[in-house]
Every structure is written in structure tokens, then in C-alpha cells.
Amino acid sequence: MRPRFTVAEATAFLVVAAFLFTTGGAPAAVAKHNSPVPILMYHVIAAPPGGAAFPDLFVRPADFAGQMQWLSRHGYQAVTLRRVYDYWLSGRPLPRRPVVISFDDGTLGQHLHALPVLSRLHWPGVLNLKVNALKSRYTLPAWRVRDMLAAGWELDAHTITHPDLTHVGDAQLWHEVNGSRTTLRREFHVPVDFFCYPSGRYDAHVVAAVRRAGYLGATTTNYGLARPKDLYTLGRVRVSGSDGVAGFARKLEGLSQ
């Protein structure tokens, strides 16, 4: 007599057979999704005015355009930090040479000069926005931020007033960390999943507040590639006004994996 199988038994048999056929009886190797990714750090996209206290924070618009062209010619493609996070956590595919292009504070040239360049390449930027920057037409009022979001940019928090978070009391720390996220989400109706430490200043207490506020990760001014083991202290590559295109290229080519 031929043995009779229930539907459940037959289904289980087919699943096991398929597994053995596709794996040779051995557990399948799990692909790692931990490749480091460069996160570029920009501040002001404009020529530095005479007597500027920190002229290297200013990148001339022509230099910025040249740097983006260099990235494109060398096979890079800009992505958001959220896409990198999803790659690290769940294996969502990334381009062959991904790069995150981040802008701190919220300054006018990021809308006037960076947005058009990135839009021509169909690339997103990442705006680390200080909430108080919304209050002036000389920085980034809300309508300019909405233009950037409409072009696919990611919005992340950079506190409200840009203090050194390692030297504020607990109430102000929470107001700056959690309050900035709450304000930006309410104003723009987008996820605000990442945090950027003002001037790169953080300690264990600050990192704990960032985690408690629900952020998925945070960026620093620590030089180097961003790696998944450092989700709340992600490294970045500062782009300085003195780099030009040649210095920018040397920085990218010199990054160690």
C-alpha cells in the first residue's frame, strides 16, 4: 500500500526537500551588511566674507559643484542616512558607491546653491537642522526647508539652539534633544530619525538622551567612514573651504575601509 500523507505532512516534506535541494543540507551563509559608508559634512555653501571667524566652514558654490561632479564621475551616488541604516540593519540594497551628503545648521546657501546642484544629479541631501534657523530669512525659513524635502532630502535634528550638550543640565539636554525632534516632526510631517551633535560634542550621558528620544543613530565630527557598530557616534568626512576639488578628491581616495 502506498503511504498516505495529510496536506500538512506533504507541505512540510516539500519545504524540507526544497531547503535541502537549495542548500546542500548545510545552513545557508548569511550575507553581512556592514560595509562602511562615507558621510560628507558641509556647513556654509558660500564664499567666506572678509574677516569670517571660521573661513574653512565656507565652501564656495563653484567648489561644491565641482566636488559633486567629481563624485558622479567616479561612480558615487548620494543616498539618505536612512537608506544606509536600512542596509546595515536589514540588507536593503545600496548603490555600488554610496555617499551621504550632510549639511549642518541650516544656512541659506544650502538651499540656494547645494539644492540645485544635487537636484540636477537626482541626489538627496541630508539636512541637520537647528530649529532656530527657521526663524530667519537669512538662514532656512520653513518654505525653503519644504523645497528641500520635496526634492527628496532627509531632515534630521541638530538641537534647537546649538549648545554644547556636554555642559547643559538635564532639563535643557532633553529639551534640545527631544524637543528639536518633536518640533521638526510637527512642523514638516516627516520622520526625524537621526541626530547630529552640535560641534561634535557628546558623552555617554548625551548619547543616552539621544537613544531615549527615539533616534535611530547620530552623527559626529569624528573623522572617518561611518560604520554600523557606531550607530550613535557615526564618523563623517569634513569638507573644508580650503579643499577645493583636488583636496576633496584626496580625502575620498584616502579613506580606509
Image: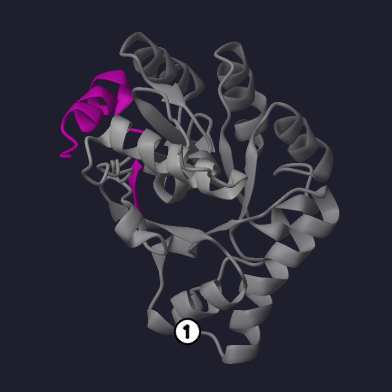
State the colouring used for the structure image: one colour
Residue occupying the point 52% across, 48% down: 9
Q: Which residue appears at 81% of the width and 48% of the height? A: 188
Is residue 241 shown left or right of residue 251?
right
Coordinates of residue 161 in the picture (x, y in percent): 64, 67
Residue 75 horizontal/vertical position (percent): 34, 14
Whether residue 186 is visible here, answered yes or no, is: yes
Residue 104 percent location from the top left of the image: 53, 48
Does 256 lie within the magenta span? yes
Q: Is residue 170 rendered magenta in the image?
A: no
- Of 123 and 87, the residue lying toward us: 87
Q: Is residue 40 shown above or below 228? A: above
Q: Residue at x 44, y 84 (%)?
A: 205
* Within-10-Å neighbours for mark 1: few <14, some 14–19, many 20+: few
The residue lying toward the viewer, choosing from 19 and 63, is 19
In the image, is 162 to the left or to the right of 100? right
- In the displayed structure, would residue 110 be above or below residue 115? below
Q: In this orientation, does residue 91 appear? A: no
Q: How many marks?
A: 1
Of residues 181 and 212, the one drawn nearer to the viewer in this rendering: 212
The residue that disc 1 covers is 167
- Could you tell me which quadrant the C terminus lies in? top left
Quarter occupied by the N terminus: top left
> Which three-letter amino acid code belongs to the residue tagged 1?
His
User: Which contiguous range is marked in magenta?
Assistant: 235-257
Q: For the point 51% across and 39% down, which residue is it?
A: 83
Q: Along the horizontal axis of the image, is 43 left or right of 154?
A: left
Say if 216 sits above or below 174 in the image.
Answer: above
Report helix, strand or loop for mark 1: helix
